[in-house]
Image: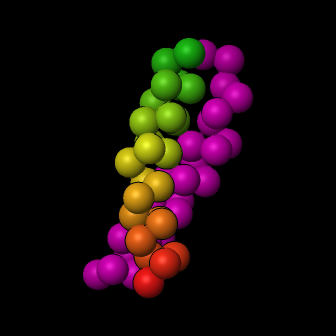
Amino acid sequence: MLEAIGRLARLADSVSETLREHPEVEVRRSAAILAARAHPIVAVLDAG
């Protein structure tokens, strides 16, 4: 289960990075929220 959560968090991080430069402000905002929610999960899994 943790492996699947880690893959999903890394995917979310990757997608948010790709969408960071999108011309629409709503998309950039959503990307920032996605990154903010995925980052703690990725950080914990990388540390452990």
Can residue 17 be seen in the rendering of this structure? yes
Image quarter of the N terminus: bottom left
Q: Residue at x 64, y 33 (%)?
A: 20
Q: Position of residue 5 (x, y in %)?
A: 36, 70
Can residue 8 be seen in the rendering of this structure? no
Asked if residue 21 is among those painted magenta in the image, a careful observer would answer yes
Q: Position of residue 35 (x, y in %)?
A: 49, 45
Q: Quadrant of residue 28?
A: top right
Asked if residue 4 is among those painted magenta in the image, a careful observer would answer yes
Measured along the vertical axis of the image, is residue 16 above or below residue 24? below
Measured along the vertical axis of the image, is residue 46 above or below residue 15? below
Relative placement, left or right, of 16 versus 40 is right
Image quarter of the C terminus: bottom left
Measured along the vertical axis of the image, is residue 15 above or below residue 24? below
Measured along the vertical axis of the image, is residue 1 above or below residue 8? below
Per the rendered image, the range of residues in magenta is 1-24
Residue in front for this viewpoint, 42 or 11: 42
Coloration mode = rainbow
Q: Position of residue 29 (x, y in %)?
A: 49, 25
Q: Residue at x 56, y 15 (%)?
A: 25
Q: Residue at x 61, y 54 (%)?
A: 14
